[in-house]
Image (spheres, coloured by chain):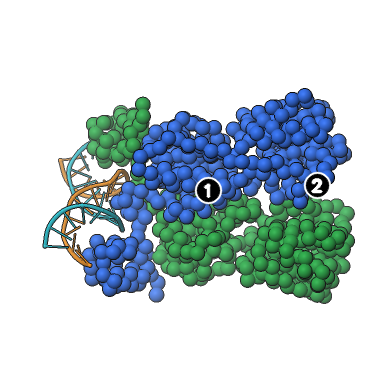
Chain colours: A green, B blue, C cyan, D orange
Amino acid sequence: MKALSKATIYQVAQLAGVSIATVSRALRDSELVTAETRERVQAAARQLNFTPSRPARSLAEGRHAANGIVFPDLVGPYYAEVVLGYEAAAAASGSSVLILATNGRRDAAAAVRDLAGRVDGLTVMGRTVDDEVVAGIAGTGLPVVLLARDPVDGVDTVRAGNTGTARALAEHLVGHGHRRLTFLGDPDDSPDVAGRYAGVRAGAKGARLTLVRGKGLDLESGRRAAAPLLTADKPDAVICANDEVALGVLLAAADLGLRVPEDLAVTGWDDLLAARFAGLTTVRQPMRELGATAAHWLHKRITEENRTAARRRVLATEVVIRGSCGAHEEVHP
Amino acid sequence: MKALSKATIYQVAQLAGVSIATVSRALRDSELVTAETRERVQAAARQLNFTPSRPARSLAEGRHAANGIVFPDLVGPYYAEVVLGYEAAAAASGSSVLILATNGRRDAAAAVRDLAGRVDGLTVMGRTVDDEVVAGIAGTGLPVVLLARDPVDGVDTVRAGNTGTARALAEHLVGHGHRRLTFLGDPDDSPDVAGRYAGVRAGAKGARLTLVRGKGLDLESGRRAAAPLLTADKPDAVICANDEVALGVLLAAADLGLRVPEDLAVTGWDDLLAARFAGLTTVRQPMRELGATAAHWLHKRITEENRTAARRRVLATEVVIRGSCGAHEEVHP
DNA sequence: TTGAAAGCGCTACCAG
DNA sequence: CTGGTAGCGCTTTCAA
């Protein structure tokens, strides 16, 4: 009972003894067909294992019924969660999702432009392509939403709060009596890191703050950067750009025989599962909600009649206190 | 300098003063056009911010230049890593990637069928849709690769080793002197879990082995399931279906005042980052390679001339010994 | 309620 | 080397 390769609407029409127009209607539950005809057509379609060709349909309808999301990587829970939230929301509004990871790709811009040609709307995250690429695509009329990224004129932007929470975090550390703070991470790396550093600076009043531009955002990068830093600067608190880097610092500190938090306080950002088991003080952000919001906004843009003004939203983040920043009465589980 | 909405090949042709056929050639670097013509056309295209319509091209070419992957979820690093490996490999062979998460979707089968109509090939992971859906799609002639899932006749399958490594893990525990083993996880949940349980059974000769069918595969599920289990069964070792569950058990054990590994050994599966910080003995699997292999195979299928026999491959996994299974001289960092 | 036919934008074949 | 043109499979008027 092997079904044939690819049945077309013509074959279904022939088998059902109607025109292709009727098949088209019947298959999409148009009210313009008799119940009887509809059934006959659907039976024929089933028998031929027929699935309408998406390209043909898209071409005729002038839409893709799909949208895309561009992110740097899927390493670590952050992007994965964002993408998951995005996919769920997009699916809810009937869109398929195309993904594009730009990391390790020399032709990121070209890849993004190509993707733009396959979708009804596009979400672009930070650290992927330049603003001019974004502007070029948005200029096409293609709805675009920026995620975790500095705004571009006329384009919607959704992001998680960095500065305010970073400031609160720094103030908390200063409140613990720490006076020699180090921020480990490169503000030029991403808008998020830049925002976090800005907040830390604001909250570190009265304490010394050193910036150490670590290269990567993974555990090994943190570990490598930490060793010289801890022996040279002798900070009493290291505020890391994200959790992975912080975990690397924790490892390096252990290697050096430094006790956390007695000799050294360490904080991260993202609240990974590992942070919980490492007792790491960090910041939690609504990852899925970020993705879901982007998908919703995109859907609105795609379906709206007259274009409305660009929107911006900053989702709330929260400091999660655990043991690594100093002793507390009660810590987060 | 706002670029117009959507330029077509006709407008480019007109602006460049050539036919659409020439535009089509020039834009795809055909050798059938003068360098001069090519440049003129490309200039016109650039000026109009032209991007060829993907549906039109796909319709004409009869291919999508895209393939898809279906997975249950993107929660936890496992699927994210697999998808990442897949995306990278697919991109390398010029394919865009469409994703579909089936979890929390009532109409998973329909969604998968729809996806099948948008791609040149499809990878389907375990725990997503029934074999009959897979068979139906494969019967269409659409290349399909199964990932981390029991084989279906005539369809390629890639998976990570479960049974052998699970057996080694169980034997290791028995070697530590543990005699009251509990496997926490539901073999009916996924082919992977079933394979792990089978291996554990084989390796638990000479010890008592209890099966506790925990519901979910997340941390809270593990934690909830562990409490009654630890007080009732009093096992001296709990082998968990994955790391998250194991971490939950660790938390529950701590709540009950049980020392790990003195009073209780615990093992997981996946080697999450958190496992390292929790000192959890676990099993590492080549997640990205799983995804990459699936993408490669799919590409081969899509481009092959005459269909070859279905292939199957099992990628190697390895036990990672840390502190949670008993005392060792040297443990993994 | 159904059918005929005109596109949707692009590729590729056939002439010239 | 370039232009004309026939589709690719489907949706959607416009008539019947």
Please tell me the numbered disc located at residue B330. 2
Residue B12 locus on image (x, y percent): 29, 67
The residue that disc 1 covers is: B292
Q: Give percent across and percent down for residue A26.
A: 32, 36
**Quarter of the view holding residue B258:** top right
The chain that hosts pointer 2 is: B
Q: Can you see residue B180?
A: yes
The residue under the point 52% across, 45% down is B293
Count of labels in the image: 2
Look at the image and tell me whether residue A35 can be seen. Answer: no
Q: Nearer the viewer, residue A261 or A56?
A: A261
Q: Specify the amino acid type for callout 1.
A: Ala
Q: Which mark is residue B261?
A: none
Q: Left or right? Give the position of A332 relative to A154.
A: right
Give the quarter of the figure containing the N terminus of chain B.
Answer: bottom left
Q: Bin the neighbour count of mark 2 within 10 Å (Cα to Cα): few under 14, some 14-19, many 20 and up.
A: few
Q: Is residue B227 left or right of residue A111?
A: right
Report the Cα–Cα distance between label 1 and label 2. 33 Å
**Kind of residue sitting beneath label 2:** Glu
Helix, strand or loop at mark 2: loop
Q: Nearer the viewer, residue B319 or B21?
A: B319
Q: Residue at x 42, y 32 (%)?
A: B136
Locate residue A109, reporting x and y percent: 47, 65
Label 1 crowd (10 A; few <14 / some 14-19 / many >=20): many
| Residue A299 drawn above or below residue B312 | below
Residue at the image position 75 percent from the left and 43 percent from the top: B321
Relative to residue A23, is residue B29 depicted above or below? below
Residue A43, placed above or below residue A198: above
Q: Image height check: is A190 above or below B120?
A: below
Helix, strand, or loop for circle 1?
Answer: helix
What percent of the width, then of the height, locates residue A20?
A: 26, 39
